[in-house]
Image: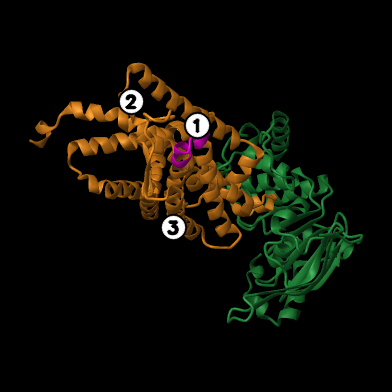
Chain colours: A orange, B green
């Protein structure tokens, strides 16, 4: 009965926004992928560094800096945040997840200091922003430019990361994340490469923050809250949907990164769908995403447990 | 790091290591180890559980700092160097086949990482075309069919295959010293024999200086030119050359019972 009251058109109206958000958050999800999967480090810094990137970008734009340049600054700010987490962990011996929580909490204060208050706006009318939600409701040329540009940007980013992780330095990061004993035995400075990976990851998250602030026309000190969950959701959705497709083929790593970005898009489309169904009050969306992530993270574990039991019986 | 003139490939001077000092779990693991290896020495190390065999290898590799003494590899005092900086002197193969390789990376990537042991990692392409050819040739010599699987993830290989690849990796950049830490203990007897044979081949072919910890006394006698027995953190028996070749397992058992006062009967060395 409820279904009859739903208007399909309103769902389709929500699609462009959902896709745009997904593409932008895909950059953040790539950052999460680097720490969570490549480095095997649960990095919660991102909840803070996303807002840091946003705050830096917005304040610079308001000060008259070119919006493109402000993104570079957002990237660097994110890298610095990642460096702090990395040094707390490697130089001071604080457990990784705790280091990242300490950075995340301190970033809350830092972000407030950068902005001077909890929220700062950048109007698309006043500044020539790189991305804006206004562009997706503009004329078709603007729309094509927006989506084309964003998708192209994502592909270029994947290309750069693909090449980087194929270099000696990128391989050293992957070896550090995969097997620290092996990395050390092969002369890799695991501390240095851990910090480096955290910097790259949080740089991407900061970049996403800068872009997303421009997209929604404001930076908010709370905009990164729960970002890690969205990032993880994107990584896991990407793996579940395209894991088999990516495995074993040439350039599998590039396809995996693309699937992470697509995962972020799927996440926002599903969220839009759930919101449209009206089965989920908007205040429950975070609970919903957390449950989804928890379920998918537990599947590999439960699968193994189940299959072991089966093997023991036979 | 300072240069010291010694004619030895490795010199251990009075090495002491105590784990968990001042606690109820305090354990003196190395209690004054002195050892000098000539260039080209291949030493096998035996001893009961907790005798300090693997601990000696870990002390050399720098897994943790020692409490006292100095470690000199090829004339360089490495005592104060961290593990990753000592790596350029050392090739290492571990007991657990999972430890020596990165399972999510391909065979060629693992080998390329090993080929750059001790060098700084730059923004250059990680595996070059020439390298791929070279690795292919090297893998062919293993006779495990790995030469056509350069891009296979190492995680898909068997334990024996992984140990074989790790051995190759250890010799890609000729090390001053090869450390084999019970590297066949986790393998089935047939695979273990094959990996051991490969170890001999690589050590001889590259004229390496090597140390091999083993629980198998027969292997300890039949491989290498020198044999060391350890007990309670000290070297208690050191035999080389012809005298070593003439050893029998029973000689080693007698020797061991002498020092351990019969407790050896319970040791798993008995079984081998």
Write down the chain letter for disc 1.
A
- In the displayed structure image, the side of residue A32 where residue B72 appears, left or right: right
The residue nearer to you, when weighing A290 against B197, is A290
For marks 1 and 3, the one nearer the N-term is 1
- Residue A105: name its quadrant: bottom left
- For marks 2 and 1, give the CA distance: 19 Å
Q: In terms of secondary structure, where does tag 2 sit?
A: helix
Which residue is the site of mark 3? A105
Q: Are marks 1 and 3 in contact (CB under 8 Å)?
A: no
* Number of other residues with Cα within 10 Å of mark 2, as a class: few under 14, some 14 to 19, many 20 or more: some
For marks 2 and 3, the one nearer the N-term is 3
Q: Residue at x 42, y 54 (%)?
A: A108
Which residue is the site of mark 1? A68
- For marks 1 and 3, give the CA distance: 28 Å
State the extent of the magenta-drawn residues as a range: A58-70
Q: In terms of secondary structure, where does tag 1 sit?
A: helix
Q: Main secondary structure of the magenta part?
A: helix
Q: Residue at x 44, y 38 (%)?
A: A62
Judged by depth in the image, the label closer to the viewer, 1 or 3, is: 1
Q: In terms of secondary structure, where does tag 3 sit?
A: helix
Which residue is the site of mark 2? A136
Task: Same chain for labels 2 and 1? Say yes or no.
Answer: yes
- In the displayed structure image, the side of residue A213 where residue B21 appears, left or right: right
């Amino acid at each position: 009965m409820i279904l009859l009251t739903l208007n399909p058109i309103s769902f389709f109206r929500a699609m462009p926004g959902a896709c745009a958000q997904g593409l932008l958050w895909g950059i953040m999800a790539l950052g999460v992928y680097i720490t969570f999967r490549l480095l095997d480090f649960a990095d919660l810094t991102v909840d803070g560094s996303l807002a840091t990137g946003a705050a830096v970008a917005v304040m610079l734009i308001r000060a008259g800096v070119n919006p493109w340049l402000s993104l570079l600054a957002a990237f660097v700010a994110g890298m610095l945040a990642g460096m702090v987490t990395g040094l707390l962990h490697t130089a001071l011996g604080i457990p990784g997840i705790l280091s990242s929580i300490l950075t995340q909490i301190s970033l809350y204060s830092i972000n407030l200091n950068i902005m001077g208050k909890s929220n700062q706006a950048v109007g698309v009318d006043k500044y020539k922003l790189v991305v804006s939600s206004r562009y997706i409701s503009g004329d078709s040329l603007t729309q094509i430019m927006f989506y084309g540009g964003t998708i192209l940007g994502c592909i270029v980013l994947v290309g750069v990361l693909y090449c980087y992780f194929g270099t000696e330095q990128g391989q050293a990061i992957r070896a550090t994340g995969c097997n620290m004993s092996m990395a050390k035995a092969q002369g890799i400075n695991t501390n240095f490469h851990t910090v480096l990976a955290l910097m790259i990851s949080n740089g991407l998250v900061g970049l996403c923050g800068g872009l997303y602030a421009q997209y929604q026309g404001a930076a908010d000190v709370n905009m990164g809250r729960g970002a890690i969950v969205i990032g993880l959701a994107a990584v896991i959705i990407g793996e579940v949907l395209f894991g088999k497709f990516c495995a074993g083929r040439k350039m599998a790593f590039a396809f995996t990164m693309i699937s992470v970005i697509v995962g972020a898009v799927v996440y926002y489309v599903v969220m839009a769908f759930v919101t449209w169904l009206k089965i989920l009050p908007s205040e429950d969306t975070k609970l919903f995403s957390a449950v989804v992530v928890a379920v998918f993270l537990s599947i590999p574990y439960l699968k193994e447990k189940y299959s072991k039991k089966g093997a023991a019986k036979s | 790091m300072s240069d010291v003139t010694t004619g030895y490939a490795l010199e251990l001077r009075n090495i002491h290591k105590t784990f968990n000092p001042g606690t109820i779990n305090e354990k003196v693991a190395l209690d004054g180890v002195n050892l000098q290896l000539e260039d080209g020495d291949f030493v096998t190390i035996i001893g009961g559980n907790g005798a300090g065999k693997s601990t000696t290898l870990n002390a050399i590799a720098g897994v943790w700092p020692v409490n006292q003494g100095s470690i000199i590899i090829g004339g360089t005092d490495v005592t104060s160097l961290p593990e990753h900086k000592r790596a350029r002197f050392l090739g290492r193969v571990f007991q657990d086949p999972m430890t020596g390789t990165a399972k999510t990376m391909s065979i060629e990537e693992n080998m390329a990482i090993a080929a750059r042991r001790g060098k700084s990692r730059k923004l250059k392409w990680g595996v070059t075309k020439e390298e791929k050819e070279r690795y292919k040739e090297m893998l062919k010599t293993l006779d495990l069919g790995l030469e056509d699987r350069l891009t296979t993830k190492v995680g898909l290989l068997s334990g024996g295959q992984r140990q074989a690849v790790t051995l190759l990796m250890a010799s890609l950049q000729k090390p001053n010293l090869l450390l084999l830490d019970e590297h066949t203990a986790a393998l089935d007897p047939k695979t273990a024999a094959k990996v051991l044979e490969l170890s001999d081949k690589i050590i001889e072919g590259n004229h390496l200086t090597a140390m091999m910890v083993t629980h198998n006394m027969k292997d300890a006698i039949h491989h290498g030119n020198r044999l060391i027995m350890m007990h309670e953190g000290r070297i208690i028996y050191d035999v080389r050359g012809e005298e070593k070749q003439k050893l029998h397992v029973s000689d080693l058992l007698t020797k061991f019972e002498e020092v351990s006062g019969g407790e050896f009967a319970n040791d798993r060395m008995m079984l081998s």
